[in-house]
Image (cartoon, rainbow, N blue to C red):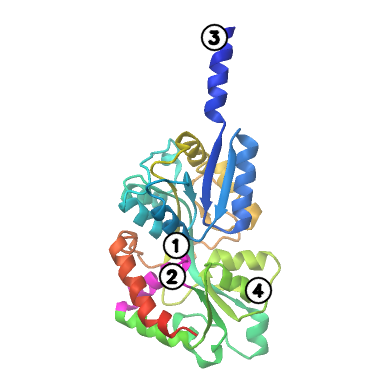
Amino acid sequence: MLATAATLTVSAAQAAGDLNVICSADVVICEQLQGDFEAKHDIKVNMVRLSSGESYAKIRAEARNPKTDIWWGGTGDPHLQAASEGLTEKYESEKLGELHAWAQLQAASSGHRTVGVYAGALGWGYNTDILKDKGIAEPGCWADLLKPELKGEVQVANPNSSGTAYTALASLVQIMGEDEAFEYLKKLNDNVSQYTKSGSAPVKAAARGETGLGIVFMHDAIAQAASGFPVKAIAPCEGTGYEIGSMSIVKGAKNMDNAKIWYDWALTPEVQSRMKDAKSFQLPSNKAAEVPPEAPKFEDIKLIDYDFATYGNPETRKRLLERWDNEIGAIAN
């Protein structure tokens, strides 16, 4: 009996403790994940919400003394960058075989230092009331966002802090060519009222009537529409990029065992099927997870063959962000 009691005590000790999580998704889904995990495990979650770019910067700055155990969500490019720099831990979950090919490819391309947890296409959401009142036609293409009647009506995030905006930058480079994309962004700047820190902030501003249109992932626009706001999501006619929202364990994590427990748990269909309850309409990575009916389906969107390896490369990312700072940030309104 004493031996059994000792064994149970050790198991409980291993399952208990803390877990330090960075969540790079909307605060509602972050809080839902935290609550659901704590309800199922004897582990206290200390969570901070940061955008993808901020998360990468924090993990990189703390590399010698990690204060984060696991990074959940946010665009895959900075996750891949962290993986290439050895900032994240190699881990192959037993759930890997249950995932869609795009999520497994994300894991394989990173040397299993990150994995796809959801996916979503880039586009924009516009306030139907504002555009109707101003007599502005629905913008269906990237080219339409340059029209003079949209002056002061466009918001997009800063790609230095936002994974959404970096995906937009990298997508335009792949669609148009790099020089042409930067010429486009210079013209678009004439219509941009604000470069936000958070990737989803522009469409939230559109929902509140503070701006006409926000360049965001389409599921963020649909979340606003599902909340009753007059917002419509658009997939650009020329084609668009997409994200593979990812998850990574931080190398040297102080709560490594608990990080792996979260990692395996977050890949289950039960957890991913709950995303819609937080009005999160991405495509889940587990093939058995329930896909929200509102979620933008890839087969209905003209997607580019987004080059995650190239645009998740640290040198490519650094060069594009420096060019954005010099040519767009320097003239930003």
Judging by the rendered image, the residue that carries numbered circle 4 is 207
Q: Are marks 2 and 3 in contact (CB under 8 Å)?
A: no
Q: CA distance from mark 3 to mark 1?
A: 49 Å
Where does label 2 land, which residue? 159
- Marks 3 and 4, Cα distance to the nearest angstrom? 61 Å
Residue range corresponding to the magenta coloring: 158-178
What residue do we see at 50% from left, 36% from top? 258
In the picture provided, is 165 more to the left or to the right than 294?
A: left
Check disc 3 and report its element: helix, strand or loop: helix
Residue 157: percent from left, percent from top: 50, 72
Identity, as a three-letter code, of the amino acid under mark 3 = Ala
Write down the residue under mark 1: 53
Q: Amino acid at mark 4?
A: Ala
Q: Residue 250 in the image: state x and y as whole percent.
A: 42, 45
* Measured Cα–Cα span from mark 2 to mark 1: 8 Å
Can residue 285 be seen from the camera position used here? no
Quadrant of residue 306 within the rendered picture:
bottom left
